[in-house]
Structure formats: C-alpha cells, structure tokens
Amino acid sequence: MCKPFDYKNPGITSIMMEVTSASSALHMYPDPIENDYEGEFLSDVDGWAKHSCEHMRAANAVAREVGNEIRGLSGILHKLSRDLEDTPEGKKLFEVSLKLSRIAG
C-alpha cells in the first residue's frame, strides 16, 4: 500500500482514489501493532486500520479543498449573474451558481 498522495490539483477523482485506498487497506490480513496498551480504537492496534485512517483523513482534506474551490466558483458566477441580471445569460448564471452552492454544501 502507498502513503496518501499529496495532490497538486485535487479533484473528485483524488477523493475517490483515497477512499479506494482506505477500503483496500481494510481488506488486508491483520497487522498487529505492538503497544504497551491495548488501545481504544482498532487503528491503535492494527497497522492496516491505521493506514486506512490516514487515507480517509487525506480524502477529507481533499474534499474540503474541492468544496472551497466550488464555493469560490459559485461566488464568481453569482457576481456575474448580478451584472447580467436582466439577460437570459444572467439568469442561467444565477441558476448555475445556486447549483454549485448546493453541491459545495
């Protein structure tokens, strides 16, 4: 298995790749971690569970970046729609900005 990737241009595909890697790590044979304590979580006692958590954190970080990008684009389109509000193009831009805003959450 590989480490979570440092994406230069994060996107939806990047999120899917991290989630796939996280899932793959959970399908491996157990890899006990030697600790002085039992641990509260599976990731405290199993190397693959810990590795899966690393990929899920990476997926979460990429999703956050993608959401921020989408929110930024939505804002730009919203401003453009106000400049063109009395035109069919302005109304369409406004609709698209609302859709992007909903997608970004």
Image: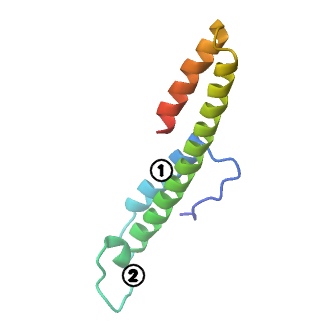
Q: Which residue is mark 2?
A: 33
Q: Residues within 10 Å of mark 2 (few under 14, many from 20)?
A: some
Q: Which residue is mark 1?
A: 20
Q: Nearer the viewer, residue 64 or 98?
A: 98
The residues bearing labels 1 and 2 have C-alpha atoms spaced at a distance of: 23 Å
- For the point 37% across and 88% down, the residue is 35
Name the image quarter holding residue 81: top right
Against 57, residue 98 (above or below) is: above
Residue type marked 1: Thr
Q: Residue furthest bottom?
A: 36
Q: Position of residue 78 (x, y in %)?
A: 62, 26
Question: Which residue is located at x 43 percent, y 64 percent?
Answer: 53
Q: Earlier in the sequence, mark 1 or mark 2?
A: 1
Give the answer, above or below, for where 42 lies relative to 52. below
Identify the coloring: rainbow
What SS does tag 2 mark?
loop
Q: Residue 46 at what x, y percent from top left?
A: 37, 74
Label 1 close to label 2 by CB (< 8 Å)? no
SS at mark 1?
helix
Q: Position of residue 66 (x, y in %)?
A: 58, 44
Inspect the image, locate mark 2, and give the three-letter code of the amino acid beneath it: Ile
Give the residue displayed 58% in from the left and 38% down from the top.
Answer: 71
Q: Position of residue 70 (x, y in %)?
A: 59, 37
Question: Is residue 27 toward the left or the right of residue 82 in the image?
Answer: left
Judge whether 98 appears above or below 2 on screen: above
- The quarter of the displayed image where residue 92 is located: top right
